[in-house]
Image (spheres, coloured by chain):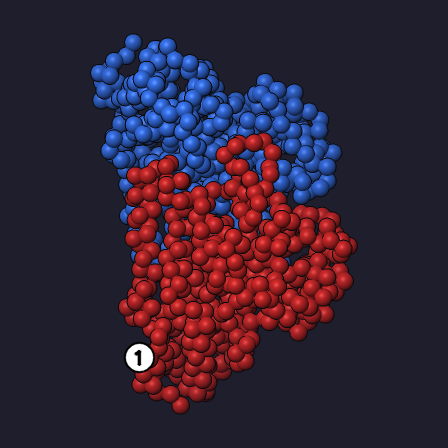
Chain colours: A blue, B red
């Protein structure tokens, strides 16, 4: 049984603790929603001033070259690459996760259609996947109008069987946004390949949260988000990974000028550039894009192994304390206890989950709520302390013991 | 024959002159490239601080609701709408021009395929259109793989004949990026409709540059850019217009969760929301998006008619002065003299256009260069004065008279 003093002592010997100073977090807030929107790196404000005042205001059009704007998707991609086991020249930061998923799915379908298994027409994914992933696959399938469909499986156990002789693509999110369940990427990829399918991985809740080694897993394509664990800023551009071995065959319909071999030759026919650049499309939002670097800079000061060790310690502690100190309340752990199957969040159900979460937020403990009945708590080792975990659980306990929540609380949209 | 004093006098009685004070422009620069990247509104820096420090840093995840982030594409769309003759609820600011064009083209093709002219499979556009427009049409056509193709016409005169019984969509850019030639949107739309085709207009060089009345022209779909004449910031999110009459039938394959009828219900099937929201896809880059408002605020202080009157006066003056004062040099006017056919830029060819432009930039006159041999000069009435025009021509004349340019200047990428 821990005490708050134990937690403070752990913080004192935590090698990652000093990195909290790199973030701006409001007084009185315990922020457990970095899995939805990462906290603000302090450096972001000055970087924005630099881009807006110096590069845009003074440099004007010249900054496309002199400030490196045009190359930024590639440069940031190379900085991000080591966090997911990618190599230089394999990642670009661009567009949104949804759009990058569309590109990756289109490329995966194309790869299949030109391979041995050309009769395959099914994209397999989980019903519990983040909805936009399913929607993009549905949009792609409906528009291809060549018999493609999306097959939804109801549990992780059913994935292997669903990847059959009809399956063209297995599209999964590495860590489930709602439950925090983490797939075995290497095993599922190996199974998909054995069945003749191509894999597309969404790393939205993995990149910066858990160690990822795309090459070791022999994954085919991956996309991910920079505004959650990577702290890139609200809605910051997403990323796409295409391993070198698939780049020559990578083709996708969003063939804008930034993906052209010679964009400034202004030729009337599209010719994709070689390499990862063919995943680019149109001109990118430079202010938001530039801020992604401020989040990545913090990761350069530690390792994903150190982050993972602290993440598991934080989530273990949270689970233990909730189960001990809120034992008399109807809380149900949704997130796996097994480390290998856990991301960097903990989800509990409660019959009044929405109302309890609103009460927590009002008391400064910011998590979020996802239908049905799930309270999500994200643990971000760069800026969350063991004492934060203790204090959050004590506030949760107090709210539950006092029934200090409004079961009629109206619901707003939270992304 | 004007004098510099005449120009200064015109500036003194120019009702738009005070708006220059709303922009940050470096000392010693005459900025004639607002057709490529608009100047920085002074308000942008403080707005960025607000979004980054207050909304992201302090508001954190709550800002999706409390700071209006989630609604921003619609709210900015409503602010932009009057500049292009659109109505409230018909425009969203989102994604890139290339991607919005893809959505509009897909919707146009869908509208056709379900109409009387379902055998139509040709997208007509100009070979001189901005390349990304052509590339996106090529990408869509190839991927649909149902006999669609892109037909390129070599001159504006040939457009009418190219819109024949095979033409599904006429896709044009209102003002040509290279020549500054402006199409007659109403006449070409009427012709396309008479032939049974649907129109998609790219307003990248029209919005904020010339008066546009999409409803009067009875256009079908339109997209545009916010980082040129609208001064939204480098690579700022673009816009898409879908008139109310086409919204119920509007369907496009980039069906991400922001276009869903109930994005937070997390349902496993895509169901588009009613209205313009179905043109949305994924989570938007909020810092870049928010800055678009700073550009639009300046337009709220004047009218497109006042802007157009000054634009024509500036471009007339520039043409006159160049032709008078640089008469001995091999400059060729590419932009139409006729007002109705002119956008808000002037392009001249010169055998050493690239080198001359580099010399101009080195002397503080910032225009840009486009293959082949074209020097572009954009005139943005919000922050360009008549004296600027005089001074720019004098510097051009001096460079040409002195042959003060390096014909071996190496070429960089300029967007």
Left or right relative to A329: residue B213: right
Relative image position of residue B31 (x, y in whole percent): 37, 69
Using residue B85 as the reference point, say whether residue A37 is left or right of it: left
Other-residue count near label 1 (Cα within 10 Å), few / some / many at <14 / 14–19 / ≥20: some
Q: Position of residue A244 (x, y in %)?
A: 54, 39
Report the front residue among B400 and B18: B18
Q: Is the C terminus of chain A in the top left, top right, bottom left or bottom right quadrant? A: top left
In this view, the residue in front, B386 or B280, is B280
Q: Residue at x 58, y 49 (%)?
A: A254
Circle 1 residue: B12
Check the residue under mark 1 and report the chain it is in: B
- In the figure, residue B326 lies in which quadrant? bottom left
Q: Is A408 displayed left or right of A167 in the figure?
A: left
Against A6, residue B150 (above or below) is below
Q: Is residue B119 above or below residue A121?
A: below
Classify the position of the N terminus of chain A by image quarter: top left
* Residue B187 percent across, percent down from the top left: 64, 71
Give the image location of residue B26, x and y in percent: 30, 65
Instruction: Say which residue appears at 32% left-offset and 83% top-offset.
Output: B9
Secondary structure of the residue carrying tag 1 is helix
């Amino acid at each position: 049984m821990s005490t708050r003093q134990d937690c403070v002592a752990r913080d004192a010997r935590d090698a990652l603790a000093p990195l909290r100073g790199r973030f701006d977090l409001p007084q009185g807030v315990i922020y457990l929603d970095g899995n939805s929107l990462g906290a603000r790196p302090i450096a972001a404000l000055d970087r924005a001033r630099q881009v807006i005042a110096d590069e845009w205001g003074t440099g004007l059009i010249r900054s496309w070259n002199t400030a490196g704007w045009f190359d930024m998707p590639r440069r940031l991609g190379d900085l991000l690459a080591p966090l997911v086991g990618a190599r230089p020249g394999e990642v670009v930061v661009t567009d949104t996760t949804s759009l990058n998923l569309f590109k990756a799915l289109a490329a995966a379908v194309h790869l299949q259609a030109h391979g041995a298994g050309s009769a395959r027409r099914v994209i397999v994914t989980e019903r519990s996947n983040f909805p936009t992933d399913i929607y993009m696959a549905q949009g792609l399938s409906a528009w291809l109008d060549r018999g493609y469909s999306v097959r939804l499986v109801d549990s992780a156990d059913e994935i292997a069987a669903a990847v059959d002789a009809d399956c063209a693509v297995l599209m999964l999110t590495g860590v489930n946004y709602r439950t925090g369940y983490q797939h075995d990427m290497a095993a599922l990829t190996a199974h998909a390949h054995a069945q003749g399918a191509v894999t597309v991985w969404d790393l939205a809740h993995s990149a910066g949260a858990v160690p990822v080694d795309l090459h070791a897993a022999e994954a085919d394509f991956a996309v991910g988000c920079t505004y959650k664990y990577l702290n890139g800023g609200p809605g910051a551009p997403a990323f796409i990974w295409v391993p070198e071995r698939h780049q020559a065959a990578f083709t996708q319909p969003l063939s804008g000028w930034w993906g052209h071999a010679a964009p400034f030759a202004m030729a009337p026919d599209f010719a994709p550039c070689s390499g990862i650049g063919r995943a680019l499309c149109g001109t990118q939002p430079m202010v938001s894009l530039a801020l992604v670097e401020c989040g990545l800079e913090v990761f350069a000061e530690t390792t994903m192994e150190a982050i993972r060790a602290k993440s598991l310690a934080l989530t273990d502690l949270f689970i233990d304390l909730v189960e001990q100190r809120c034992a008399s309340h109807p809380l149900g752990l949704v997130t796996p206890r097994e480390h290998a199957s856990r991301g960097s969040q903990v989800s509990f159900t409660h019959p009044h989950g929405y109302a309890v979460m609103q009460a927590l937020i009002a008391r400064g403990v910011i998590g979020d709520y996802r239908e049905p009945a799930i309270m999500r708590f994200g643990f971000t080792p760069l800026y969350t302390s063991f004492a934060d975990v203790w204090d959050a659980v004590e506030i949760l306990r107090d709210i539950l013991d006092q029934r200090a929540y409004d079961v009629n609380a109206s619901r707003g949209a939270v992304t």
